[in-house]
Image (cartoon, rainbow, N blue to C red):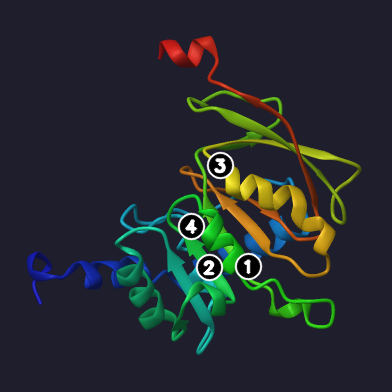
Amino acid sequence: MPASMTSPSEDLLVALAPGAHAVQRVFSMLLRTLSRPGEIGLMPDHESVVPASVMPLLCLVGHGTPFAVVGTDDDRMLGGAVARVTGGNQCPVEDAAYVAFLESPASADLVSLRIGDAMRPDLAAQILVPVGVISRADDRAGHVLATVLLSLEGPGVDGCASVRVSGIGEPLLGMLSTRHSSFPAGVDVWLVDTLGNVIGLPRSTRVTVLDEQGPTAEDSEN
């Protein structure tokens, strides 16, 4: 079929078919950031037609793996493309092992997630959530939105780590701040920003919101 006659779904399939080397790079980065909370990883270059929060599904989802893409009218089309590329099983959020959000999740979505239990913590979901910008705690360059400073403590963290994030929703902040009390049940989270930066926040990490700040005067002038 000529390129001019391809459908949006076919365009997505082309964009969602990276080589084995790219998939391995993403998979290694996801494992590293989840085992070292606060370390900022970087997604390899990807087609802009595919949201950055969806791309990691290509290396997390295998044949028959239950997953969901949630957030806008495009979620079923994106989910269908992921299913065709990976062989995964697109399903409702409450049944999914992996969930990619296309926008910051609402409370109703978060309470629907699988959290496992003390006997089967492996049944908990792992989720990918888009945010504005992720940066080191002392680096606010490029932030044009209100930011929050997150303090991270727990396994994989040397004492305490801090990261600054913009565009993160209040429902997700609330869940991150309280989920530690349910450990070993709970949800593992990757935050993915518009530049492809990624941080992992496993359920074993205690997350504290230290402050919330608006844009700097310099940002507001630009």
Q: Which residue lies at the image location 60% right of the left edge and 24% below the top edge?
A: 140
> Rounded to the nearest whole Å, what is the CA distance between mark 4 and mark 2?
9 Å
Of the two numbered discs 4 and 2 on the same chain, state the one appearing first in sequence: 4
- Find residue 173 and report its image quarter: top right
The kind of residue on which mark 3 rests is Ile
Q: Residues within 10 Å of mark 4 (few under 14, many from 20)?
A: many
- Find residue 185 and report its image quarter: bottom right
The secondary structure type at the circle numbered 2 is strand
Furthest residue in direction bottom, as rendered: 64
**Is there a contact, CB below 8 Å, between mark 4 and mark 1?**
no
Q: Which residue lies at the image location 33% right of the left edge and 71% below the top edge?
A: 76
Judged left or right of residue 119, residue 195 is: left
Query: Can you identify the residue that label 1 sits on?
Result: 126
Of the two numbered discs 4 and 1 on the same chain, state the one appearing first in sequence: 4
Q: Residues within 10 Å of mark 2 (few under 14, many from 20)?
A: many
Q: Which residue lies at the image location 30% right of the left edge and 63% below the top edge?
A: 74
Quadrant of the rendering where the C terminus is positioned: top left
Query: Can you identify the residue that label 4 sits on?
Result: 53
